[in-house]
Image: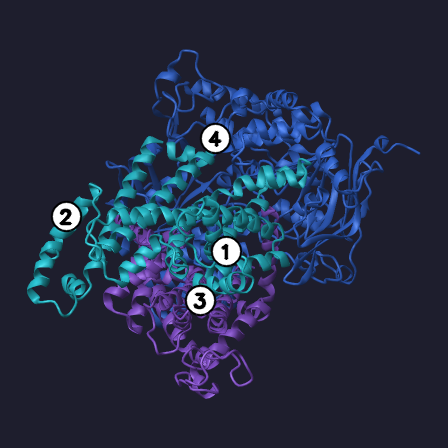
């Protein structure tokens, strides 16, 4: 099989030379995948909601209607109302805002820091790798949700805090992935070749190695983005994330639970925010999966 | 109704087409392939990468990858067509009639099962009981010349050497006494002396089991040695077929002619006879060419060739039946194919006696006590090519890496360049030193950063080490690109868009950019096809002549080393066993190990000198033998016991020719003379 | 082998030590002082100082850290701010409850996800694979409180098949308690399924594409034999490590699930301690989780070494 694959590849390579024809770019291949398109459509939908939520929603998400509390889904309130009479649909639409600001920023922070750390660990190796490796291992030993709320309790919940804490928690995770990619690159001769040109470690890490591990980092970013949504929503649910009355899916579910919405039969107060979170997560996974498939092909 | 088993033809492949679906497009990997193998015959399929030779094997076993399918034609093995058999019958065919052995034996064995279990399984599947299967497995392992089968059966694959593992795989393949044994590059991953042993074993077993063999290889000499008949595959088509000796002595297809001219022959040297090359590239599978597949690269091409595909044309022989075919309208002219590269050579390098590099007391011990180099003293003269020869574990690559500063030697070593001492680590070396010492790595895929463009890859050393910028850099870049015979249009591309040969040219341009005085070539052509190899060797020779560069040329291929080197160093387990002028090392008297290496290599000249057989495995460098490190395998070990107890010194018998052996020079001189006399 | 074990244990101790540092420091960056937090705003400054002295929080940071660390070696995990008694019995009881829930989740998820991963690998690229892979990946990243809430609506409220609370009443039999744990275990199973199935799939695909699988097929073995004897043996080894590292995520999930279902486990303990700013309790809970994780990965490494002859040989040399 491998022999055969190698032979096929050899033929393909030789072929592209005289013609100099570019193969379909990876971006093109990505656009051809239905899973990618569905995922992207869902994300775009939520981004539109986040930006234009107030204009789209038929009701003010904060407006209480004491005469219409806990009403079931109907023509007037498609997703029903909560125990203060607030429109669930409006809250779901507007609730996308915070999570769509917090999670990409937190993931980006973690990815940038993790990449720098991972490159240094993988390329420099030695005592630095051993030491930082232990810290990474120690952070991994603690579930990220727990570390997150440990620090958020200490620092007090706010959007910048949540971004900072989640970014920092993701740093070692991403560093570990980047490090292992760097280790495979490190054995390749182009590194030796660069050293023979007298290149400095900084250049070797960022100009020689980084472009080669970038696809792995891209996949890691999308995977972590999924987890960031997971973590932020969970923190909100536990009361350590985005604070009420600002609408947030996780916080709304927690609020409904506190009011025993499920036991009272007001399932819509939980189900629709839950579906919103699920749709976002699934969308990101669809995208991650298609990126991986394209990179593997 | 005749019984199918009575037929003298065991395997018949007719008009076979195989298609791979790549990126939603069909690509024809094999086109109209027809050949037959008679019972007891050994048939060789030879071709370069992309020729489709492995696809033939996989189609026969019906083990094509998911995206591949047989799109036309038929196969009959002992009268049965594997393509139409049902599940049970197919398993039966694989279990009893056909077996296959392929390139990497260690990967062919299941890493988490003991050897005994894996071999016994091959017997169990054809109906042996558990104990019987184990007993038969042990017996079979003995037949493949494993001396202690009981112990080997208890081992896991990772505990075996490559040669041993290939014996185990062969044992499994022969379990059912198959009618047909398919060998796909069975010795390509092995060292020369081990390869020779395994090839001998295959020949011996072939007659013992009376098995037909389909032998697939890129190595023409191995095919010549092992096969009765041969088929030459090019771009998925069989272009020539006939008796092995006849095809190699008197090829009748321009491709075969070109291929044979790419291989350095005995007596051919860089300074008086250049290798010929095959211009151009392999066409796309599913190329849509109307005529002959070789037409775009053929010097004999006529309009007729482009208009229609030539059939396999029977070649008439003087005695009437030649059994030879060639897919060429002009097969009679093929032997007189005009050269694509002129044979004359540019002025050769001036050799001086000045040592450029001197290495003294060079040792390198890796973690775990592996002594990769032991007390090596060497000098490299200005302008010469020093060939480093040795099997795996000999330390040849470590030696190069120490010289370059990529690996630091054990304390006490001295390396000087132009009389100045070199820092052991590359990061401590000044720019002026770095620019003088460069390398061409074995595998350009690994040596070239795949994310950088060819332009930036070549320009970087010019900027960094030669200190050029702006218009000067541009001008030098253009010169350099022309001197390695790349084209301007390649500059914007990434390495992955280039063929292997072009990639290696980029790597060579990078090495020569800084104007080095010494370039290490670490197996620079071993990842390339023969036809590409010749062009790269020519290029290296031309550059050397033009720039007066010194080469340290590392290779396991003695033919290449002989073609290119002025002096040769033979390494074994980190020791210099022999060093001397190239012709002296080849013609002898030589060290018994050199002698064995030389005789292990099959040659195309049709002369197969009586092989000096080595037995046993290459010992581990972590635990080398006492005394002379070669004594465990040496066929000429002295009976006095001195070889086991004392390591011999490196003695200079003839001027400039040193040998590390206890046997006196006069003794050493004797035997090679006898063998070469006997074979002529 | 001995040397490997020694090295591995040394690294483990180092990791645990860093865990104690992280846990301790996280507890210390909290603004305000514990005495005030416990006694409330109405208490006098003097009584707050007295309490702070009793709790030992008025001493320098380094002294407190080493006192705490020293206490840990004697099995003393500190005194709860909230309950004013030793933390240890609370942690012990909670840990036992969590282990029950966690084990149940593992017992369900390990065979299920390995099966799913292998099936996906056998159908590599075709629809069963895509369905299993994408479902798995999505379930893994849907927070437990989301799936938990949906499950409660369906099975607890609408269908009334399973009890909504995780804690069976006092005097309930083990079987009854087990019934109460099923619903809380499912969100954990969802999360774990994706990871483990993914690894099992990747390992199996690699094994199926390997040369040794080709050897086995070409020997004429049945497909089922090839898969069972040759492919799976090699493909499932890396999965063991993943299962071990998942204990960390499992415990993270416990915080949510135990809170959602009001189950008295370690996650709930940590949550309540965090809300009540009971730092000794919080530190003890988090530390225990770290210890469990480190031990689980150690066990996995040893198991892997025992199962994989090549690794065994490499480590021995």
Residue C170 lies, in percent from the top left, at: 39, 50
Q: Quadrant of residue B107?
A: top right
Between the residue at mark 2 and the residue at mark 3, the CA separation in whole angstroms equals 72 Å
Q: Is residue C188 above or below residue C99?
A: below
Question: Chain A colour?
Answer: purple
Write down the chain letter for disc 2. C
Asked which secondary structure carries label 2, the reply is: helix
Q: Identify the image quadrant of the N terminus of chain B.
A: top right
Closer mark to the observer between disc 3 and disc 4: 4
Residue B326 in sight from this viewpoint: yes
Judging by colour alone, the chain drawn in blue in this rendered image is: B
Q: Quadrant of residue B37?
A: top right
Q: Is there CB contact under 8 Å for labels 4 and 2?
A: no
User: Where does label 1 land, which residue?
Assistant: C194
Question: Chain C colour?
Answer: cyan
User: Where does label 4 land, which residue?
Assistant: B159
Closer mark to the observer between disc 2 and disc 1: 2
Q: Is residue B125 above or below residue C257?
A: above
User: Where does label 2 land, which residue?
Assistant: C67
Between the residue at mark 2 and the residue at mark 1, the CA separation in whole angstroms equals 42 Å
């Amino acid at each position: 099989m491998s022999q055969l694959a190698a032979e096929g590849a050899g033929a393909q390579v030789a072929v592209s030379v005289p013609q100099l024809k570019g193969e379909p770019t990876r971006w093109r291949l990505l656009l051809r995948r239905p899973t990618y398109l569905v995922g992207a459509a869902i994300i775009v939908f939520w981004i539109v909601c986040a930006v234009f939520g107030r204009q789209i929603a038929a009701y003010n998400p904060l407006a209480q209607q004491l005469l219409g509390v806990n009403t079931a889904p109907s023509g007037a309130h498609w997703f029903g109302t909560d125990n203060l009479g607030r429109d669930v649909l409006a809250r779901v639409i507007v609730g996308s805002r915070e999570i769509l600001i917090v999670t990409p920023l937190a993931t980006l922070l973690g990815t940038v820091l993790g990449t720098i750390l991972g490159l240094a660990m993988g390329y420099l190796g030695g005592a630095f790798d051993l030491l930082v490796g232990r810290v990474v291992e120690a952070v991994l030993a603690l579930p990220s949700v727990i570390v997150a709320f440990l620090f958020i309790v200490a620092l007090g919940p706010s959007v910048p805090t949540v971004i900072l804490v989640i970014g920092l928690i993701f740093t070692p995770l991403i560093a570990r992935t980047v490090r292992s990619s760097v280790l495979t690159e490190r054995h390749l001769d182009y590194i030796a070749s660069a050293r023979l040109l007298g290149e400095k470690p900084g250049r070797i890490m960022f100009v020689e190695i980084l472009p080669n591990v970038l696809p792995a980092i891209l996949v890691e970013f999308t995977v972590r983005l999924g987890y960031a949504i997971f973590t932020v929503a969970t923190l909100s649910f536990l009361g350590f994330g985005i604070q009420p009355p600002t609408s947030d899916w996780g916080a709304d579910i927690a609020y409904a639970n506190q009011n025993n919405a499920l036991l009272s039969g007001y399932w819509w107060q939980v189900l629709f925010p839950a579906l919103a979170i699920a749709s976002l997560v699934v969308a990101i996974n669809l995208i991650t999966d298609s990126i991986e498939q394209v990179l593997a092909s | 109704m005749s019984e199918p088993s009575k037929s003298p033809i065991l395997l018949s492949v007719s008009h076979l087409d195989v298609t791979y679906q790549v990126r939603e497009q069909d690509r024809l990997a094999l086109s109209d392939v027809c050949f037959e193998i008679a019972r007891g015959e050994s048939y060789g399929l030879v071709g370069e990468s992309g020729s489709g030779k492995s696809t033939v094997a996989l189609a026969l076993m019906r083990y094509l990858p998911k995206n591949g399918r047989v799109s036309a034609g038929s196969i009959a093995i002992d009268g049965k067509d594997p393509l139409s058999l049902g599940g049970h019958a197919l398993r039966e065919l694989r279990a009893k009639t056909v077996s296959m052995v392929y390139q990497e034996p260690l990967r062919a064995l299941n890493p988490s099962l003991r050897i005994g279990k894996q071999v016994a399984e091959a017997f169990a599947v054809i109906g042996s009981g558990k104990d019987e299967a184990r007993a038969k497995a042990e017996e079979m392992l003995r037949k493949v010349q494993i001396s202690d089968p009981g112990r080997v059966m208890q081992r896991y694959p990772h505990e075996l050497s490559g040669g041993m593992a290939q014996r185990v795989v062969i044992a499994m393949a022969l379990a059912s006494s198959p009618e047909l044994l398919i060998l796909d590059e069975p010795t390509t991953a092995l060292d020369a002396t081990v390869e020779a042993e395994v090839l001998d074993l295959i020949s011996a077993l072939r007659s013992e089991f009376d098995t037909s063999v389909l032998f697939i290889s890129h190595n023409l000499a191995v095919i010549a040695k092992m096969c009765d008949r041969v088929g030459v595959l090019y771009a998925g088509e069989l272009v020539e077929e006939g008796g092995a000796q006849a095809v190699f002595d008197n090829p009748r297809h321009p491709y075969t002619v070109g291929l044979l001219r790419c291989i350095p022959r005995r007596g051919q040297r860089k300074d008086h006879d250049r290798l010929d090359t095959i211009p151009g590239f392999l066409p796309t599978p599913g190329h849509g060419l109307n005529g002959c597949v070789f037409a775009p690269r053929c010097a004999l091409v006529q309009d007729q060739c482009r208009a229609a595909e030539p059939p396999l044309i029977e070649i008439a022989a003087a005695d009437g039946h030649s059994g030879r075919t060639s897919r060429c309208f002009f097969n009679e002219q093929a032997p007189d194919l005009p050269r694509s590269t002129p044979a004359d050579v540019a002025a050769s390098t001036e050799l001086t006696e000045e040592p450029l590099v001197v290495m003294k007391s060079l040792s390198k011990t890796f973690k775990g006590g592996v002594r990769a180099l032991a007390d090596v003293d060497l000098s490299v003269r200005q302008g010469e090519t020093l060939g480093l020869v040795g099997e795996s574990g000999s330390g040849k690559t470590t030696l190069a890496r120490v010289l370059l500063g990529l690996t630091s030697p054990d304390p006490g070593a001295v390396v000087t360049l132009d009389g100045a001492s070199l820092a052991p680590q590359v990061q401590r070396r000044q720019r002026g030193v770095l620019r003088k010492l460069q390398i061409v790595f074995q595998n350009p895929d690994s040596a070239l950063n795949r994310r950088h463009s060819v332009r930036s890859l070549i320009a970087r050393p010019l900027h960094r080490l030669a200190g050029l910028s702006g218009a000067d850099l541009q001008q030098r870049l253009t010169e350099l690109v022309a001197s390695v015979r790349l084209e301007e249009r390649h500059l914007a591309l990434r390495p992955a868009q280039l063929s292997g040969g072009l990639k290696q040219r980029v790597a060579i341009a990078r090495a020569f950019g800084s104007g080095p005085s010494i370039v290490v070539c670490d197996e620079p052509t071993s990842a390339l096809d023969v036809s590409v190899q010749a062009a790269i060797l020519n290029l290296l020779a031309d550059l050397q002549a033009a720039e007066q560069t010194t080469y340290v040329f590392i290779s396991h291929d003695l033919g290449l080393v002989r073609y290119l080197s002025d002096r040769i160093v033979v390494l074994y387990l980190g020791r210099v066993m022999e060093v001397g002028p190239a012709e002296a090392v080849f013609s002898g008297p030589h060290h018994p190990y050199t002698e064995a290496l030389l005789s292990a290599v099959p040659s195309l000249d049709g002369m197969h000198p009586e092989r000096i057989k080595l037995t046993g495995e290459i010992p581990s460098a972590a635990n080398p033998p006492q005394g002379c490190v070669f004594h465990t395998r040496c066929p000429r070990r002295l009976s006095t016991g001195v070889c086991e107890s004392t390591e011999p010194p490196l003695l200079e018998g003839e001027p400039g020719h040193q040998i590390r052996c206890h046997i006196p020079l006069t003794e050493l001189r004797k035997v090679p003379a006898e063998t070469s006399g006997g074979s002529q | 082998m001995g040397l490997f074990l020694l090295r591995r244990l040394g690294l483990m101790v180092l990791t645990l030590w860093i865990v104690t540092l992280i846990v301790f420091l996280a507890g210390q960056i909290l603004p305000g002082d514990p005495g005030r937090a416990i006694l409330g705003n109405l208490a006098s400054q003097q009584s707050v100082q007295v309490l702070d002295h009793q709790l030992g929080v008025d001493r320098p940071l380094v002294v407190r850290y080493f006192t705490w660390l020293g206490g840990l070696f004697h099995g003393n995990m500190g005194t709860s701010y909230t309950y004013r008694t030793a933390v240890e019995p609370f942690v012990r009881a909670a840990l036992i409850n969590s282990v029950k829930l966690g084990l149940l989740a593992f017992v369900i998820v390990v065979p299920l996800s390995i099966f799913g991963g292998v099936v996906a690998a056998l159908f590599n690229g075709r629809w069963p694979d895509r369905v299993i892979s994408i479902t798995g990946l999505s379930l893994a990243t849907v927070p437990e409180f989301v799936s938990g809430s949906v499950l409660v609506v369906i099975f607890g409220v609408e269908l009334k098949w399973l009890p909504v609370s995780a804690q069976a009443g006092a005097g309930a039999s083990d079987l009854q308690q087990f019934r109460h744990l099923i619903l809380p275990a499912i969100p954990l199973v969802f999360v774990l399924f994706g990871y483990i199935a993914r690894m099992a799939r990747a390992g199996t695909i690699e094994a199926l594409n390997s040369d040794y699988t080709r050897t086995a097929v070409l020997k004429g073995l049945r497909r089922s034999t090839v898969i069972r004897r040759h492919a799976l043996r090699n493909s499932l080894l890396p999965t063991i490590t993943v299962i071990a590292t998942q204990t960390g995520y499992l415990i993270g999930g416990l915080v949510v699930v135990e809170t959602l279902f009001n189950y008295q486990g370690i996650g709930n303990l940590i949550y309540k301690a965090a809300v009540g700013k009971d730092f000794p309790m919080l530190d003890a809970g988090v530390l225990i989780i770290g210890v469990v994780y480190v031990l689980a990965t150690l066990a996995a490494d040893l198991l892997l070494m025992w199962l994989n002859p090549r690794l065994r040989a490499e480590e021995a040399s």
